[in-house]
Image (cartoon, rainbow, N blue to C red):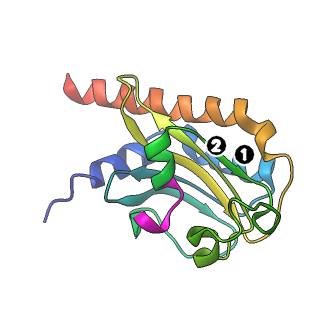
């Protein structure tokens, strides 16, 4: 069976900046796992991953969409920042941090030039962090770089 989303995984992996973006995201946040994910109404697919905490997810692998916060980001179009799950009443009983043992989380939507939602740039960790909301400009910039490169690759493929 030919999975149409494998092309999205391959496209992200062809973007040279993604590896350094994931490394910078881990450094800026202090988190140990960062990824670019393709997110649709029914799928969450890791396109590229940096895993320093043995979360155990590789590029091309999937999480059940309803177990992710990225699904909510797809619905809202807004980024999410959680410094400390246990200290945040909105998140401490949320199913995603409970299921995956997360204490900190940051994610930003990747919006293509045509306005379509591609997925998310996200980072997670089992340890609480501080100051994640201050990273909004950097998250926006990283997501824009990824979106612009996806658009460029798509344009090249259509020629």
The residue identified by callout 1 is: 24
The residue drawn where x is 29% and y is 25% is 156
The residue drawn where x is 49% and y is 41% is 76
Secondary structure under tag 2 reads helix
Chief SS of the magenta region: helix
User: Is 78 displayed left or right of 92 in the figure?
Assistant: left
Q: Which image quarter holds the C terminus?
A: top left
Residue 121 in the image: state x and y as whole percent: 56, 46
Q: Which image quarter holds the N terminus?
A: bottom left
The residue drawn where x is 72% and y is 45% is 24
Q: Does the segment drawn in magenta span residue 107?
A: no
Residue 82 in the image: state x and y as whole percent: 73, 55
Please name whichever residue, 151 or 113, is drawn nearer the observer in this view of the structure. 113
Quick check: 53 above or below 155?
below
Residue 61 in view here: no
The residue identified by callout 2 is: 21
Whole-Å distance between the Cαs marked 2 and 1? 5 Å
The residue drawn where x is 69% and y is 59% is 90
Question: Where is residue 78, by image quadrant?
Answer: top right
Residue 21 in the image: state x and y as whole percent: 64, 43
Residue 27 in view here: yes
| 2 and 1 marks in contact (CB < 8 Å) | yes
Question: Which span of residues is magenta-colored?
Answer: 66-70
- Badge 2 crowding class, 10 Å Cα cut-off, few under 14, some 14 to 19, many 20 or more, is many
- Badge 1 crowding class, 10 Å Cα cut-off, few under 14, some 14 to 19, many 20 or more, is some
């Amino acid at each position: 069976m030919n999975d149409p989303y494998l092309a999205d995984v391959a496209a992200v992996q062809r973007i040279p900046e993604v590896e350094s973006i994931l490394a910078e995201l881990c450094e800026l946040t202090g988190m140990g796992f960062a990824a670019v994910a393709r997110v649709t109404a029914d799928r969450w697919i890791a396109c590229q991953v940096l895993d320093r905490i043995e979360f155990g997810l590789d590029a091309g692998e999937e999480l059940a969409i309803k177990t992710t916060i990225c699904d909510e980001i797809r619905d809202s179009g807004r980024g999410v920042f959680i410094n400390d799950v246990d200290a945040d009443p909105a998140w401490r009983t949320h199913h995603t941090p409970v299921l995956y043992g997360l204490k900190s989380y940051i994610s930003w939507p990747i919006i293509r030039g045509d306005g379509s939602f591609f997925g998310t740039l996200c980072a997670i960790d089992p340890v609480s962090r501080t100051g994640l909301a201050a990273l909004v400009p950097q998250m926006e910039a990283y997501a824009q770089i990824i979106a612009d490169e996806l658009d460029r690759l798509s344009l090249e493929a259509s020629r």
